[in-house]
Image: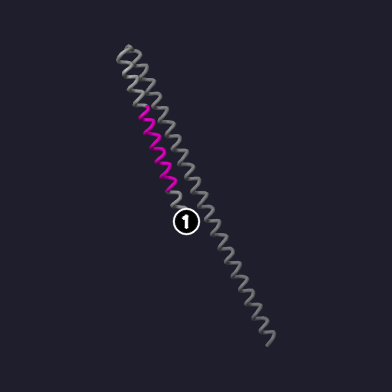
Amino acid sequence: MIMIMIMIMIMIMIIIIIIIIIIIIIIIIIIIIIIIIIIHTYIIHYIHTLHIIIIIIIIIIIIIIIIIIIIIIIIIIIIIIIIIIIIIIIIIIIIIIIIIIIIIIIIIIIIIIIIIIIIIIIIIN
């Protein structure tokens, strides 16, 4: 039950992160398009060919930098998610081990008690 709850929580987190990333990418794309439109209209009216080339190069560089940043963010998020999942799995394994140890101890105690009772009965008889 706990495992299912944890898995559901992880899935929800992943979905939220993906949605946030998609929104960020969309916003960045819109901003880039607006910048390109503004620069383009500006170019048409005022600037020469050389300036156009320079501006296009600058835009390309900006787009590449933005894409690299987005990729880095996505990688970091994925790494964080993996670390969280590993930690959760380790915690679950530790809990299971503790439960098994407790059960073994209880069984040993019960066996000892039964042996003591049998010895007492034998002594009394």
Q: Residue furthest bottom?
A: 125
Mark 1 belongs to which amino acid?
Met
Give the magenta part as a residue range.
Answer: 12-31
Closer to the camera in the image, 106 or 48: 48
Q: Main secondary structure of the magenta part?
A: helix
Rendered image coloring scheme = one colour
Q: Which residue position is annotated with label 1?
A: 3
Q: Verify whether residue 19 appears in magenta.
A: yes
Graded by Cα atoms within 10 Å as few (under 14), some (14 to 19) or many (20 or more), the crowding at tag 1 reads few
At mark 1, the secondary structure is helix
Q: Verify whether residue 36 appears in magenta.
A: no
Q: Position of residue 101 (x, y in %)?
A: 58, 63
Q: Is residue 74 above or below residue 65?
A: below
Q: Residue furthest left?
A: 44
Q: What residue lies at 68% left-to-right and 82% top-to-bottom?
A: 120
Q: What residue lies at 69% left-to-right and 86% top-to-bottom?
A: 124
Relative side of 48 to 77, left or right:
left
Q: Position of residue 22 (x, y in %)?
A: 38, 37
